[in-house]
Image (spheres, rainbow, N blue to C red):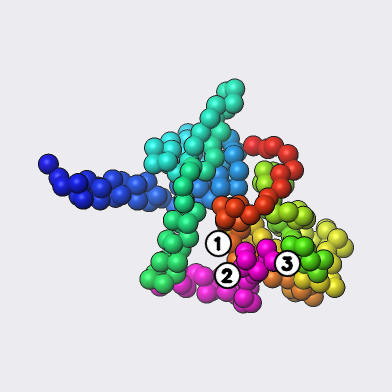
Amino acid sequence: MSSPKVQIYEQLAELAKMLGSAHRLELIEYVSQGERSVERLAELTGLTVANTSQHLQLLRRGGYVRSRRDGKRVLYRLGDGPILELLASLHCYAERNSAEVREIVGDYFGKLDHLEPVTREELLGRLDDEDVTLLDVRPEDEFNLGHLPGALNVPLGELERHLAELPRDHEIVAYCRGPYCVLSFEAVAALRAKGYHVRRLKDGFPEWKAAGYAVEVASSGM
């Protein structure tokens, strides 16, 4: 029989294996925005409902997501524990040790936003100031599930039509789903090209919520 240490390592290896899929990592990002149905998650990822369900069931076995039934639908939410912190550590490790990840970050994300992003701590200290506007560029249903206090929701695809609502006399801080979410990067690039003073939040809504900071909910949505 294996030693207790080896048994623990075997369980750790099994948990790590459950994260070994780009689709499952993406699903964790989506459920970290708020509770979603399997059908909506399939739509967001471009997978079939059956394939999405299989990935989610595996993540549920590992405790990465939780589920509940709502009539005929199955709804998923982020599991308990430091899941986002675990993924953040994986991001840092990859950027340090993977040349491919560094190249993608530099060639794509770096070109869209070369300025230092705003940290959660810095933004928290400015929430009561009137010289900063929070811009949530996620889809409306994600915004309704939860958002930073006082944030204005303008999905990226609607940005051009709502430029008149954005201030030019003080800073805009844009955010979306997380550190690799392209929505805020593209929003920042587009607004800077039009002369707006805008920076990006270093993390996204899930990390803000996981840190225990205040959030607002517009309405329930799946």
Name the residue beneath numbered marker 3.
Answer: 126
Please tell me which residue is depicted at 47% across the width and 57% down the height of the picture.
Answer: 85
Badge 3: few (under 14), some or many (20 or more) residues near its Cα, within 10 Å? few
Relative to 220, 40 lies left or right: left
Q: Position of residue 113 (x, y in %)?
A: 63, 73
Farthest right residue in view: 164
Name the residue beneath numbered marker 1.
Answer: 180
Badge 1: few (under 14), some or many (20 or more) residues near its Cα, within 10 Å? some
Mark 3 lies on a secondary structure that is loop
Name the residue beneath numbered marker 2.
Answer: 109
- Quadrant including the C terminus: top right
Q: Amino acid at mark 3?
A: Arg
- Quadrant including the N terminus: top left
Q: Nearer the viewer, mark 1 or mark 3?
A: 3
Let me know if residue 123 is in the magenta part: yes
Mark 2 lies on a secondary structure that is helix
Q: Position of residue 14 (x, y in %)?
A: 30, 46
* Magenta region, residue range: 99-125
